[in-house]
């Protein structure tokens, strides 16, 4: 291999990651077969060209997709139509065979894998590269069998990708917000940010009145929870146990609650409410009378204009206001 020349693997990955260039002038058409399905002669029919076949095995590709399970696991269109359609996709994607193969895998429910694509070769002049891919698609791809497995693998891989800068978020399809990076810093994977944010929201919801000092503890607890999840996934029971113990100590030190704080004073009797207040503000605070002196004379107003009239009404007394009243024997005409 020449110095600086790219390997087959590098070229394959490069083709997969290359931005899609769509040739909008391409119109994929597949002609109908001259030997159409005849129920007296054939048992199987191609859903694309209409050709009839007596057996499926050598004429149709198989798929693990549940969409074709009642067709004996075979695609409903024949191998020849597969070749013609794939060539049309190559033209659609401006000659990029990787993009054409991925598109077909999506349609057929096949797993799409760079290793299988790299191993796939054009079988013969009348068989395209997609036929070679059909034979290689289940080799060295782990437990992946369908295109859905491909989607899951890509998603999990994305979750494990570490964010190295805020600018990286602008040039990728990360679902991480800039505020999350500001709160936790860089150097975490997407799954870590999600775990951190979810635990943060839970603690804040249950402790809406947390002060600045408790906020520091809340962030520490979120980091511990993330490490606990990692240890649990790794099966490290000892590390997990140590982290749980540390989490418990930090939680108690912070004085946080595990359930949401709610104001239930409206549902409590006065004595219970006063007892709750006393936990935060002792009764000794009120011994200094000057702290709650009636500077606005609200008490005097209540005695004169509320208590006095009620007393006269209830007990038949005739107590008058000390300032505003009509004197006995006065001249009403004056």
Image: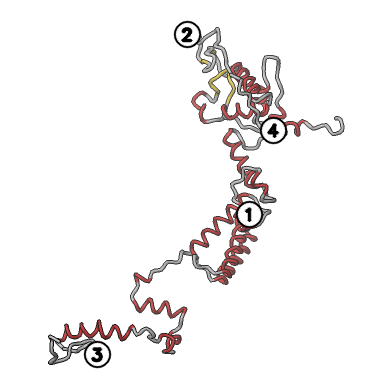
Q: Nearer the viewer, mark 3 or mark 1?
A: 3
User: Residue at horizontal 25%, vertical 82%?
Assistant: 305
Q: Where is 48 relative to 216, above or below?
A: above
* Residue 236, position as x, y percentages in the image: 64, 56
Q: Quadrant of the C terminus?
A: bottom left
Mark 1 in CB contact with mark 4 (< 8 angstroms):
no
SS for tag 3?
loop
Nearest the viewer among 244 and 205 is 205
Alpha carbon distance from label 1 to label 4 = 28 Å
> Which residue lies under the disc numbered 4?
18
Q: Earlier in the sequence, mark 3 or mark 2?
A: 2
SS for tag 2?
loop
Alpha carbon distance from label 3 to label 1 = 70 Å
Disc sitting over residue 205 in the figure: none
> Which residue lies under the disc numbered 1?
181
Q: Earlier in the sequence, mark 4 or mark 2?
A: 4
User: Residue at horizontal 49%, vertical 61%?
Assistant: 205
Would you say 41 lies left or right of 117 here?
left
Q: Quadrant of the N terminus?
A: top right
> Which residue lies under the disc numbered 2?
40
SS for tag 4?
loop
Q: Nearer the viewer, mark 3 or mark 2?
A: 3
Q: Where is 100 relative to 309, above or below?
A: above
- The quarter of the displayed image where residue 221 is located: bottom right
Q: Earlier in the sequence, mark 3 or mark 4?
A: 4
């Amino acid at each position: 291999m020449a110095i600086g020349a790219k390997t087959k693997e590098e070229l394959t990955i490069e083709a997969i990651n290359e931005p899609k260039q769509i040739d909008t002038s391409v119109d994929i058409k597949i002609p109908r077969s001259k030997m159409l399905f005849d129920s007296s002669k054939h048992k199987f029919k191609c859903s694309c060209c209409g050709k009839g076949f007596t057996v499926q095995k050598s004429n149709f590709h198989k798929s693990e997709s549940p969409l074709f399970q009642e067709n004996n696991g075979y695609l409903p269109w024949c191998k020849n139509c597969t070749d013609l359609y794939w060539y049309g996709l190559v033209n659609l994607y401006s000659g990029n065979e990787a993009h054409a193969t991925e598109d077909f895998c999506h349609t057929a429910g096949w797993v799409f894998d760079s290793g299988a694509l790299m191993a796939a070769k054009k079988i013969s002049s009348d068989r395209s590269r997609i036929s070679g891919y059909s034979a290689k698609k289940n080799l060295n791809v782990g437990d992946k069998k369908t295109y859905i497995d491909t989607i899951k693998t890509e998603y999990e891989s994305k979750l494990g990708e570490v964010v190295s800068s805020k600018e990286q978020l602008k040039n990728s399809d990360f679902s991480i917000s800039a505020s999350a990076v500001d709160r936790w810093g860089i150097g975490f994977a997407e799954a870590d940010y999600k775990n951190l944010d979810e635990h943060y929201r839970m603690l804040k919801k249950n402790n809406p009145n947390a002060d600045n000092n408790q906020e520091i503890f809340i962030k520490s607890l979120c980091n511990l929870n993330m490490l606990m999840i990692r240890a649990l996934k790794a099966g490290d029971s000892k590390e997990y146990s140590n982290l749980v113990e540390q989490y418990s100590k930090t939680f108690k030190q912070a004085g946080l609650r595990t359930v949401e704080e709610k104001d239930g004073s409206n549902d409590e009797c006065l004595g219970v409410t006063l007892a709750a207040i006393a936990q935060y503000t002792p009764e000794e605070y009120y011994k200094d009378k000057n702290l709650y002196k009636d500077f606005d004379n609200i008490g005097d107003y209540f005695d004169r204009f509320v208590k006095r009239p009620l007393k006269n009404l209830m007990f038949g007394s005739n107590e008058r206001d000390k300032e505003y009243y009509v004197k006995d024997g006065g001249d009403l005409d004056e």
